[in-house]
Amino acid sequence: MKKGYVYSLEMLIAVSIILVALVLIFREGPKEQEIEVSLLKRYAWESLEYLNNNGTLREYVANDDEGSLESAVGEILPINVFFEVDICGLQCDDTNVPKNETVISVDYYVSGYRNVFIDKKIKLWAWTGIP
């Protein structure tokens, strides 16, 4: 009879120790910087995806119209997000991307437009700042 009580007490202590350890390990959530970076990456990806879904992205890429693509992305992204877009093949030009900021990059591939194979990549760099 006493053996069952001791076993139950040992189990309660073990479970309590495990719960306390888990709370101590996982009590700190993600830092604000990590949340901001992940949201920024999501905004960038979804802006390109939106343009692709409404049919304008492929047209811009097929015509190599980087200016119109930047205008369209600028209308979608929040005002405090700065970005640079490059339509490229293998090598993308990052000369206008700041080196002293936390910058995310998103690659979006376009294979064709109106039955024409174009094989291009859209590279979008984004970072936050004060407008």
Image: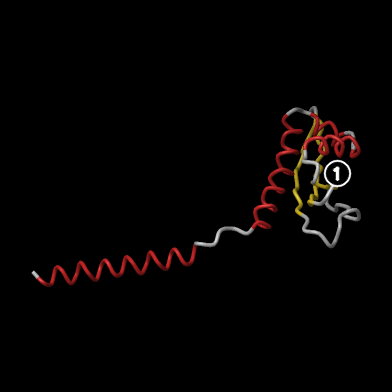
Please state if 96 lies on the left or on the right of 103 as rendered.
Answer: right
Q: Amino acid at mark 1?
A: Ile
Dividing the picture into quarters, in which one does residue 47 lie?
Answer: top right
Crowdedness near tag 1: few (<14), some (14–19) or many (≥20) residues, C-alpha within 10 Å:
many
Q: Residue furthest left?
A: 1
Name which quarter of the figure residue 33 lies in.
bottom right
In the depicted view, which residue is nearer to us: 121 or 6?
6
Q: Which of the two residues, 54 or 72, is positioned nearer the viewer here? A: 72
> Which quadrant of the structure image shows residue 44?
top right
Where residue 6 sits in the image (x, y, percent)? Answer: 18, 72
Coloring basis for residues: secondary structure
Give the residue at mark 1: 87
Where residue 74 appears, as percent x and y from the top left, is 83, 38
The residue lying at 89 percent from left, 53 percent from top is 93
* Residue at 50% across, 62% down: 27
Left or right, residue 48 beside residue 4: right
Q: Is residue 3 above or below residue 66?
A: below
Point out the image quarter for the N terminus.
Answer: bottom left
Task: Count all numbered tags in the image, as a single digit.
Answer: 1
Q: Residue furthest front?
A: 130
* Residue in the picture at 85% in, 61% down: 99
In the rendered view, does 64 fall on the left or right side of 104? Answer: right
Q: Tell me: residue 14, above or below residue 44.
A: below
| Residue 72 horizontal/vertical position (percent) | 83, 34
Which element is circle 1 on?
strand
Q: Position of residue 64 (x, y in %)?
A: 90, 38
- Residue plotted at (80% across, 30% down): 56
